[in-house]
Image (tube, rainbow, N blue to C red):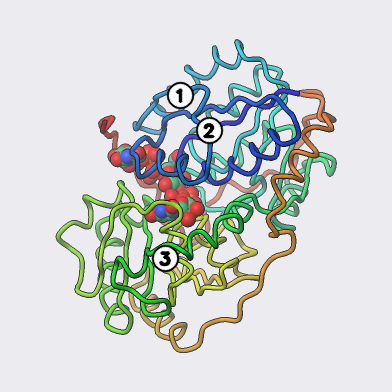
Amino acid sequence: MHVLFVAGARPNFMKVAPVLAAAVERGAATTLVHTGQHYDAAMSGVFFDELGLRAPDHFLDIGSGSHAGQTAGVMTAFEPLLAAVRPDVVVVVGDVNSTLACALVTAKSGIPLAHVEAGLRSRDWSMPEEVNRVVVDRVSDLLFVTSPDAAGNLRREGYRPDQIHLVGNVMVDTLLANIERARARPTLSRLGLHAGGYGLVTLHRPANVDDPDVLAGLLGALGKVAEQCPLVFPLHPRTRARVEGRLPAGVTTLPPAGYLDFLALQAGARVVLTDSGGVQEETTVLGVPCLTLRDTTERAITVTEGTNQVIGTDPERVVAVATEVLARPPRPRRPALWDGRAGERIVEILLAGDYGGHGRRPTDITAQTARTAPPNAAPATPRSVAARGR
Ligand code: UD1
Ligand code: UDP
């Protein structure tokens, strides 16, 4: 059995790592492809070093670009590679443009496709990731889901039960494997912080950081929250230039943090304010209150069974809810199967080899997700075409 894994952007590396490790452990032949969607040391290299990921077998060197440019670039580079490697199955993770591009190429190659983190739905079509999620699921043979609500989404959209596998959360596998190493690091002391004495912020969604009004409102709210609890804010490269010179007192910015430092920062935080997908899940497992600065989440289980609240971007509401959570933190719970063994479960199913390719994809999906935005969803934000930045 030969399994090809695709990774391209920051949130892919910690998802691929446990599945790849389990496949190697079980004796499968493996190929690791890095598309190069993220390429800075702080957005890519550090995760290979810290997670013990081997160097990619193939680096596509795609870099930044418009949605179409980036997706097409990955597709064009991946197609001949896939034809040459001819694995038995391709595994894609998450919802970034690299996931979409490699899924589309695989779907037309006749090689079975497995999607890890399938079935998540924000129902906000202004998010590029929502488009990617729905399309990737539609062309996948195997759908590995993190939670019962994701499985329910897929069933409602007409996927066959035998395609859907509730396996747990690979991001949590990586968290649990690394949390003690993270806690042992001098991350907090180096920054002059102590556990429970600060809040942590991340922002990178285009709807928040590319819209100057929304961003100004959020920065104002962060300033007010920082009057009660100092905030630390590692800056995603998309966000960096947009906030420079505009940060309120009490908010300390950092470069993008490495995985272990960021885990340590999350574990010690009194509250996390974020628009990240993965951070909603990690705070749930760490039992740290999370305020999601968006109108929707695709990770509903972190609200129903975790520490997450989806509070939107209205500055007054952000300050009011943060004040409340600082005074009364929620009681932590952890979703079933978020136990560190999702990668093993996935590989068990992959190695069984019972996924037969195109013939098993549903041909009659009648209940697709409605293509309408929720009433209060932010309008689609055009993406800037950036230079390659290397
Ligand atoms: C991408 C994903 C998003 C994910 C995020 C994780 C898509 C559509 N979006 O968003 O789902 O949550 O990654 O972090 O796939 N840049 C650098 N260095 C890098 C990478 C990017 O400077 O190593 C800068 C470039 O100016 C680039 C911008 O960041 O144009 C955005 O990068 P891009 O990968 O297009 O989107 P993200 O916002 O990172
Ligand atoms: N992360 C990190 N350093 C940071 C911010 C995030 O290592 O400065 C990690 C975080 O712990 C999680 C993943 O990156 O594992 C989430 O990625 P991101 O927020 O970029 O993307 P999303 O999950 O929103 O797609």
**Can you say whether 252 is above or below 100 in the image?**
below
Residue 172's spot in the image, x, y percent? 61, 56
Q: How far apart are marks 2 and 1 (CA)?
A: 12 Å
Residue at label 1? 59
Q: Residue 54 carries which label?
A: 2
- For ligand 1, give the image quadrant: top left
Asked whether disc 1 touches disc 3, contact meaning CB atoms under 8 Å apart, the reply is no
In this rendering, position of residue 302 left or right of residue 36:
right
Where's residue 321, x and y in %? 43, 80
Which of the 4 image quarters holds residue 198?
bottom left
Per the image, label 2 sits on a secondary structure element best described as: loop
**Quadrant in which the C terminus appears:** top left
Q: Determine whether the residue tagged by mark 1 lies in a helix, strand or loop.
A: strand
Q: Which badge, 2 or 1, is on the more N-terminal residue?
A: 2
Q: Position of residue 243 (x, y in %)?
A: 22, 57
The amino acid sitting under disc 3 is: Leu
Q: What residue type is labelled 1?
A: Phe
226 relative to 362 in the view: left or right: left
